[in-house]
Amino acid sequence: MASLSVNHLVGIKELSKEDIALIFQTADNFKSVLNRSIKKVPSLRDITIANLFFENSTRTRLSFELAEKRLSADIVNFSSASSSVKKGESLIDTVNNILAMKVDIVVMRHPNPGAAKFLSEHVDSKIVNAGDGAHEHPTQALLDAYSIREKLGEVSGKKVVIVGDITHSRVALSNIFCLQKLGAEVMVCGPATLIPKYIHELDVKVEHDLRKALEWCDVANMLRIQLERMDVNYFPSLREYTMLYGLDKQFLNSLSKKIVVMHPGPINRGIEITSDVADSDQAIILDQVENGVAVRMAVLYLLAEKIKREA
Amino acid sequence: MGEKRILNDKELDLSVNRLCWQLIENHSDFSDTVLIGLQPRGYQLAKKIHSKLLELAPISSIFLGSLDITFFRDDFRRREEPIAPNQTDISFLVEGKNVVFIDDVLYTGRSIRAGMDAINSFGRPKQIELLVLIDRRFSRELPIEPKYVGKTVDAIDTEKVVVEWDQDKAHKGQVSLIRE
């Protein structure tokens, strides 16, 4: 069996197509483990993982924690709200202190883009990026593509539109890299103020009319409006955003084909999608969450495989 | 490098037949017995045994499953080359059942140990028996012994026992010892 070409999961950009295929294959096996009555395997029993969350997270953190526990790893959790970061400690110092406690893998979310890369260059442990600012969120993109593969059979040749706040979204960038590597066509759709000026250089289509975008696509990934990252007003009001870029059941039913609706969560029900869309049979939002644990197990397993045991 | 035939087509067939009759002797109608082939090669043998059993005895159905032990192995991170996981397919209950593990070659016994760990994720079997086509009897590293043996082979560590199935229409299978 091949192993990953990278030593850390910093971003999708660094992964090869083969790496992604290997992660998906391994995730298939872990998904079957997760459907057993005892959902645990002993593979990582001598591995210690630190989850460092310098930014709030519920889903990603729970998903990583569960994946680690299912693999029998020992874990330590850290969140910046209750730590020395508030006392002025630098990132590298915080992490070095944790590594001095002999940690093999670090899963980190950080508000600064590039934090995971910086860390991977300065510490010996394997780094898994769980989101760095508006840069990348590789495991989210992997689980999104994995869910598309599960629902539609394959990703290659499919048309995916990412709708909403592209500028502030790490999910969008990682998704673009991941889907393109797997041979899908990607379009972004949203108000001009929320779409980065040079995004077309990534070879993605840009559309400002939601109806045109949804008529084009097989899959729509509806992103959350990240009000917490907006320091100025990018659109007049949430109500106007919803009128122009929100998806409701009537809109969904009026499309000429049945598209798949995804959302990376947390959903602002009634803003980017309405409740009846989120709960409809075209939405695979909860499948995404379920697949997230299997995909993260695969990533951790394949990275741990690279930590050779000292004799 | 040399190669020595341990079982030819005909002998292999005889051995598999004998193993089947031994299973029938001990499990009669297989109502409380399930067959589990260890992935990947044990499952190939298990499929052959399963179809032969249905041929030989008046039994309408026998449960057959495949078990992948990759995540339960004790040599993770200790191997040069990673092992690719295979599919596990157990679509029946093993709780309270007699489980027959089927593998092609029994060597150190470590795969079987991992298999015993793995099967517990599906329930607590009443008992586990082990059937192997080839038993390399002097190579055991754990206290594990098979109940049904096709053929016992004395081989040293530098030798490899290879079971091949269905090479072509004329040859249904063979077992050879390869010296490196």
Image (cartoon, helix red, strand yellow):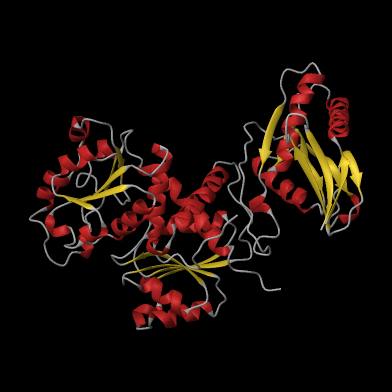
Comparing A165 with B45, the one in front is B45
- Tell me the residue at 81%/52% (across/down): B109
Rendering coords of residue B96 (x, y %): 73, 34
Residue B155 sits above or below residue A116 on the image: above
Can you name the residue that lies furthest to the left here? A236
Q: Position of residue A134 (x, y in %)?
A: 28, 65
Name above or below for residue B71 compared with residue A287.
Answer: below
How far from the left and from the top, in percent, is residue A118?
39, 76
Q: Which quadrant of the figure contains the N terminus of chain A?
A: bottom right
Across and down, in percent, residue A304 comes to: 57, 64
Q: Which quadrant is the C terminus of chain A positioned in?
A: bottom right
Towards the viewer: B16 or A167: B16
Whether residue B130 is visible to the viewer of this picture, yes or no, is: no
Label count reads 0
In this image, B80 relative to A154: left or right?
right
At x 53%, y 67%, the residue is: A49
> In which image quadrant can residue A81 be found?
bottom left
From the viewer's side, name the closer residue of A118 and B95: A118
Residue at screen point 34% across, 42% down: A157
Would you place residue A135 above or below residue B52 in this image? below
Residue sitting at x 9%, y 49%: A240
The reply to whether residue A28 is in sight is: yes
